Image: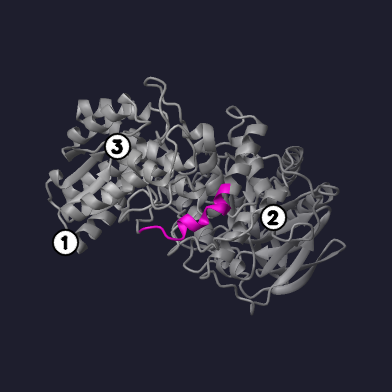
Amino acid sequence: MQDGYLKVATITPMVRVADVEFNTKEICNCIDEALAKKVKLLVFPELCITGYSCQDLFFQNQLLQRALEGLQKIVKHSQGADALIFVGLPLVIEGKLYNVAAAICNGQILGIVPKTYLPGYNEFYETRHFHSGRDLNTMIRIGEMEVRACTDIIFECRQMPSLRVSSELCEDLWVPESPSIKHCKAGATVIVNLSASNEIIGKGRYRRSLVSAQSARLVCAYLYASAGPGESTQDVVFSGHNLIAENGTILAESERFIKNMTISDIDLEYIESERRRMTTFEPDCSSQYTKIEFTLNIEETRLSRYIDPNPFVPSIEQEREYRCNEILTIQAMGLRKRIEHIGCKKVVIGISGGLDSTLALLVTAKAFDYLDLERIGIIAVTMPGFGTTDRTYDNAVMLIRQIGASFKDVNISKAVRQHFDDIGQDENVHDVTYENSQARERTQILMDIANKENGIVIGTGDLSELALGWATYNGDHMSMYAVNCSIPKTLVRYLVKYYADTSDNLDLKKTLYDILDTPVSPELLPPDGDKIMQKTEDLVGPYELHDFFLYHMLRLSQSPSKIYRLAKLAFADVYTEDVILKWEKTFYKRFFSQQFKRSCLPDGPKVGSVAVSPRGDLRMPSDACVNTWLEQI
């Protein structure tokens, strides 16, 4: 439960239709198994105590009485259990039969939630047996307990205030205005759905998309537990398709047609921060909800959910082509509009033989193709200096020619030496002045060529560099349109590799692969022969770590200690804990101290969910103090 995480489970037990004693024992066994795995929230299917497919046996008093006895046995079994448990059963309330979810915790029934929408179409006939709980709001006695029965209940955890649970049942999700909408507007962060959804062709995919979409639009965790093996197959088959979703992401999904227990960890801190961030998520404080408190022991949740070490990179290989083309198109269309609006026919771009300028050139070529402009209007400039190696220079030249851009070579050594003389800089002192003088000279050259050619300068810097401030102010920091400004380094590499893998030009493919194999470097310090001596990741840290920190800080608003915890899991086989901690400190120090560079960024297209434009996503004071964040680290 630390850091807002809660281990949850959706469970499909084996059932026998109308055999309450068997079903009750199975449910109790599943509870024990889940508790052994430290699960704190358990959801069973609709009518699981009797079986969903009892049909007219629901009219039999014997079955209904046994169901109530079964519930009481489960409640007794839960004594001492540190979990909130939802089970389904048929229950007579004030002379009417309802399909309900019973919320149980530590030997107590907290509340009874009746189903609102009863299907009576196609293969469903619930309206034959049950009444809608839409207007039900009463107190009932079960054994020695007085229990509230109504749809509008939120179960709140005293020890974890962000854990606020409401329930709906099966069809309630499939209707235009589901109860979960008002539940979440009233404050619920978790929706549990006790379901008995039969399986037909294509329904599994639709159900998955429905659960995912509902969790996204309601900014909640959604736990869907469905009936499975053991239900009658007289006319339909139940698959036990269980799903756990969080704000649009399916965290866990069961294999269908088997008894199963699907477990994951939901992040309630993330849900709460997303709701705060989204000004259009408007709570409804006028709703008359019953708030029922329950108690759980506070303990650290051992995470079982997958922690993606590369959150900016497409994780599903089948989506690679679609995602990469979408990203490249967004970048190119942004540049296309700018060129079209200005009315220029030429652009200027500095090509170093590194990843960032390579991607920028590929995007620029794509924009020119959209505009039906000849690629010779792309003036690609190489500007070798004191740190340029033959490898990167040759790759830059080959790339320019293979793309079909105009090639221009300007060696900056003479001009920089003159500048050193002008300001009294010793060329043998390889300090920040030595480095930045070269970067600013290159930018001056690009800007002046753009003036001469009546064009604009295309920026090549990426999101990771902007986050770390790893750019020379008024040097490579500046351009007239920055196509990579919201592309982090890990994604830059992924996109260039995709372009290389799918290119029909064998020479271009070879050049791109060699660029991918070249260490990331600004090449501002003299090499040792042709060996690059200045490797960026040796100086500021691995970009995959910094991209991980950046995503979790800006996109998920997570604390430094939580990010450190997740990074240890994500990079367990790559970096030691000390290394992760070292570079996380570096990240925070640089991120806070370098905001002044981001406050005056040129225009550029937002591509993903994280961006640092001062006109868009990141309104941050340049003089903010990092101490609060470093203290926690």
User: What kind of secondary structure does the magenta stretch mostly adopt?
Assistant: helix
Based on the picture, tell me whether residue 593 belongs to the magenta stretch: yes
Q: Quadrant of the C terminus?
A: top right
Question: Do residues under tags 1 and 2 come within 8 Å of each other at their CB atoms?
Answer: no
Q: Which residues are magenta?
A: 590-602
Q: Which residue is mark 2?
A: 628
The earlier-in-sequence mark between 1 and 2 is 1
Q: Which circle, 3 or 1, is nearer the viewer?
A: 3
Q: Amino acid at mark 1?
A: Gly
Q: Position of residue 572 (x, y in %)?
A: 62, 30
Residue at image point 31% right, 35% down = 413
- Mark 2 surroundings within 10 Å by alpha-carbon count, few (fewer than 14), some (14 through 19), many (20 or more): few
Real-space CA distance between mark 3 and mark 1, rounded to the nearest whole angstrom: 35 Å
Q: Position of residue 305 (x, y in %)?
A: 60, 40
| Image quadrant assignment for residue 625 | bottom right
Q: Which circle, 2 or 3, is nearer the viewer?
A: 3
The earlier-in-sequence mark between 3 and 1 is 1
Based on the picture, tell me whether residue 398 belongs to the magenta stretch: no
**Is the residue 313 above or below the residue 224 in the image?**
above
